Image: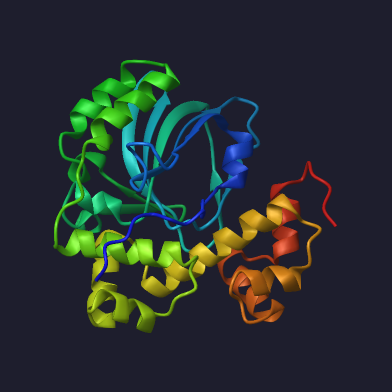
Amino acid sequence: MNRLLLRSSYKPCQPDLEQKCFVNSYKVQENDVLHGKVWEIYQYEIGTSFPNAITILPDGLIELVFNFCEGQASSYLMLASTETNSLDVHRPETGFGIRFVPGWLGQIQYAPLSRSRNTQDSITYINSAEIITNFDLLFQQIISTDSFDQRVNYCKEFFGGVENVGDNQSELARQACLYLINHNGNKTIGDLENFMGYSSRYIRKLFDKYIGYSPKTMNEIIKFQHSFHHYSTNPTRSLSDLACEFGYYDISHMNRAYIKLAKQLPKSLYQNLYAGKQAT
């Protein structure tokens, strides 16, 4: 198996969350010490006039979130559902989040998804301290400042020096995810078997321990996220062309994929998430 680096332009996103809540965002670039480990670091704010719900799309990521509410600070790892859901928000809060490249968390703790989980409103929550070695150090650093830039620097110091481990399960899981991401979700489990040199059963076991989604579901999410991001930048484009460009057999195949993951067709999803834009 040839060792892969992150080479795709793929960037999973949460449009509703980003438009309604994000006040700062740091997107990791190729020459960054966090490249291949973290996709984005963000700060969010939910005020008293918030409309009470956020649409959360499947994105295949595990996020580390620090939450500040009523003078209390807490933290958790968050794994989103495999279908679009509405997340209710009942109180004002601020927070700070780190969106990890799928598979990378295994580099800092064995089998992160074998730990205890708590599922609420279709979101899976995992105790941060059970997953991340020396987590209390990072927690104390993040809560010690309100500066977004300083928090980003703390993340670079904490995660940037972590080297990828050798030939073990966590590295195999990371490589499998990079393979799917670099091919924009257009590879089969057979292709993944050939690349990895392991059986589909063993690969699915790795995904269950380290990723949280099956290889098939991760492929579907990558293709969905990649196509919708490009559609949202140009909603007047032909949907048939969109389907062809992003690896769907035809527009019917793409529509079925969107109904499964987003419960809506591409145009309706765009109109509902980008109400302030003119869609046709």
Q: Where does the image place residue 195, in percent across and percent down from the top left?
A: 30, 76
Q: Provide residue 177's location: percent of width, then percent of height.
A: 35, 63
Left or right, 182 with respect to 141, comes to: right
Q: Quadrant of the C terminus?
A: bottom right
Applied colour scheme: rainbow
Is any part of residue 70 visible from this angle?
no
Q: Position of residue 49 (x, y in %)?
A: 65, 27
- Image vertical order of residue 176 relative to residue 111, above or below: below
Q: Is residue 59 left or right of residue 258?
A: left
Q: Is residue 163 left or right of residue 38?
A: left
Task: Indicate the quadrant where residue 199 lies.
Answer: bottom left
Q: Is residue 23 visible?
A: yes
Q: Residue at x 22, y 77 (%)?
A: 202
Q: Residue at x 33, y 46 (%)?
A: 37
Q: In the rendered image of this protein, does residue 14 appear above or below residue 46?
A: below
Q: Residue at x 44, y 39 (%)?
A: 28
- Toward the viewer: 107 or 92? 107
Is 200 in front, or is 71? 200
